[in-house]
């Protein structure tokens, strides 16, 4: 047997806030990575972070609906509940209990320095910054450490939270662990290789900015969104991410869907202009997503099955969280 065959499968955790349907940016940024890890035999946990929705708003709209939509998106792209644990935050009380000892391991100054939190505060819909906003990276450390994840596939903006998680794991082990047998591993981030896709307005593709193509969008809606995409007046289509970011992002999207590269797609269009580019991208996206969308539509008919997937995921997450919490309380001398 080879060394790789005997190495245990890595424990992987990642997740999303249920604030809207997942889009192409998520697909090429992280979902594809998750499906690949699942195929390679990773022990994968996916958290639907419903509590985390309340960090930048006082009331969460349509939470139950968005949770179901996330489950649908996950299953449609190929996450398989026989191999992957899909669960909601709020269904796992023992996970949240880890927040208390973890909060004791970080300083207020550290919380206030987190660049992603600062950015979210700048864009927040809240009148005042809540304690939940300031402490959510510590909560996210609990999401990651409750199952002792070793690998966390995330986007660039999540790196400060990963760093906070590593700090918390290290400090917990140093303060409460026995020498030589740490309670928590220090998890590593896994960044996607795929280039960043822009939204149709040229800004960051985002669920809340109306500039994203949802995985579950219809073919007509996809065509409409792409027809309205910002481009430029130069009829010669060329890949130039610095000088022509919008055109280049569309070329990248087409190339990702076609399994080609952006330069080759640009050459195929030549000087046929932005309308031809948009037609090419639309066809590539619709073709690529057709099987995902068909599966999504089929699964959407079976709400009972979706509920069952979550119920099973929640049960497994609870088992794991209770075992970790017991270990934590024991290490802290409480039990
Ligand atoms: N903060 C992540 C986001 O906004 C979602 C998330 C919550 C997460 N808990 C997590 C991601 C744990 C990775 C690991 O997208």
Image: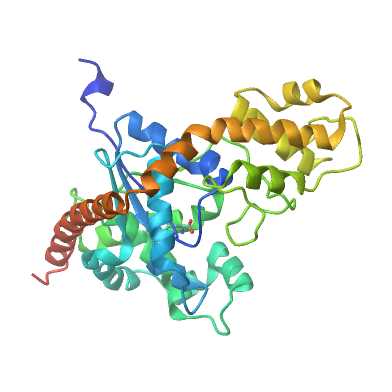
At 24% across and 22% down in the image, what residue appears?
Answer: 5
Which of the pair 69/131 is nearer the observer? 69
At 27% across and 49% down in the image, what residue appears?
Answer: 305
Quarter residue 123 falls in: bottom right
- Residue furthest to the bottom in view is 127
Image quadrant, ligand 1: bottom left
| Picture quarter with the N terminus | top left
> In this rendering, does residue 20 appear at all?
yes
**Horizontal and vertical percent for residue 106?**
39, 70
**Horizontal and vertical percent for residue 329?**
15, 67
Which color scheme did the rendering employ for the protein?
rainbow
Which of the pair 43/326 is nearer the observer? 43
- Residue furthest to the left in view is 335
At 33% across and 28% down in the image, what residue appears?
Answer: 40
Name above or below for residue 65 compared with residue 6.
below
At 39% across and 36% down in the image, what residue appears?
Answer: 78
Which of the pair 8/67 is nearer the observer? 67
In-image side of 65 versus 247 (left or right): left
Name above or below for residue 266 compared with residue 209.
above
- Residue furthest to the top in view is 1
> How many numbered badges does the structure rendering display?
0
- Residue furthest to the right in view is 234
**Horizontal and vertical percent for residue 4?**
28, 22
In-image side of 179 versus 210 (left or right): left
Quarter residue 67 falls in: bottom left
> In this rendering, does residue 15 appear at all?
no
In-image side of 129 versus 297 (left or right): right
**Horizontal and vertical percent for residue 13?**
35, 48
| Picture quarter with the C terminus | bottom left
Name above or below for residue 30 compared with residue 317.
above
């Amino acid at each position: 047997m080879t060394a790789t065959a005997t190495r245990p499968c890595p424990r992987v955790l990642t997740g999303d806030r249920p604030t809207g349907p997942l889009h192409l940016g998520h697909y090429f940024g992280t979902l594809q990575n998750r499906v690949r890890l699942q195929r390679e035999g990773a022990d994968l946990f996916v958290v639907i972070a419903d509590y985390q929705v309340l960090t930048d708003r006082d009331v969460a709209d349509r939470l139950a609906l968005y949770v179901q939509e996330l489950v649908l998106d996950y299953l449609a792209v190929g996450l398989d509940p026989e191999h992957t644990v899909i669960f909601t935050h709020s269904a796992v009380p023992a996970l949240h209990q880890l927040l208390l000892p973890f909060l004791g391991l970080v300083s207020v100054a550290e919380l206030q320095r987190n660049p992603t939190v600062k950015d979210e505060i700048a864009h927040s819909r809240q009148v005042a910054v809540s304690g939940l906003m300031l402490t959510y990276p510590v909560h996210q450390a609990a999401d990651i450490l409750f199952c002792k994840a070793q690998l966390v596939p995330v986007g660039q903006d999540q790196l400060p939270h990963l760093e906070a998680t590593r700090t918390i794991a290290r400090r917990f082990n140093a303060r409460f662990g026995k020498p030589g047998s740490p309670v928590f591993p220090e998890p590593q981030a896994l960044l996607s290789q795929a280039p960043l896709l822009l939204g149709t307005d040229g800004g960051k593709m985002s669920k809340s900015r109306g500039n994203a193509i949802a995985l579950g969008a219809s073919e007509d809606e996809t065509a409409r969104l792409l027809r309205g995409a910002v481009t430029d007046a130069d009829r010669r289509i060329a890949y130039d991410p610095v000088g022509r970011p919008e055109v280049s992002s569309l070329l990248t999207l087409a190339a990702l869907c076609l399994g080609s590269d952006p330069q080759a797609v640009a050459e195929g269009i030549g000087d046929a202009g932005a309308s031809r580019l948009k037609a090419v991208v639309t066809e590539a996206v619709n073709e690529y997503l057709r099987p995902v969308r068909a599966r999504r539509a089929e699964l959407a008919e079976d709400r009972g099955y979706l509920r069952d997937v979550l119920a099973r995921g929640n049960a497994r997450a609870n088992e794991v969280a209770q075992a970790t919490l017991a270990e934590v309380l024991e290490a802290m001398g409480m039990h």
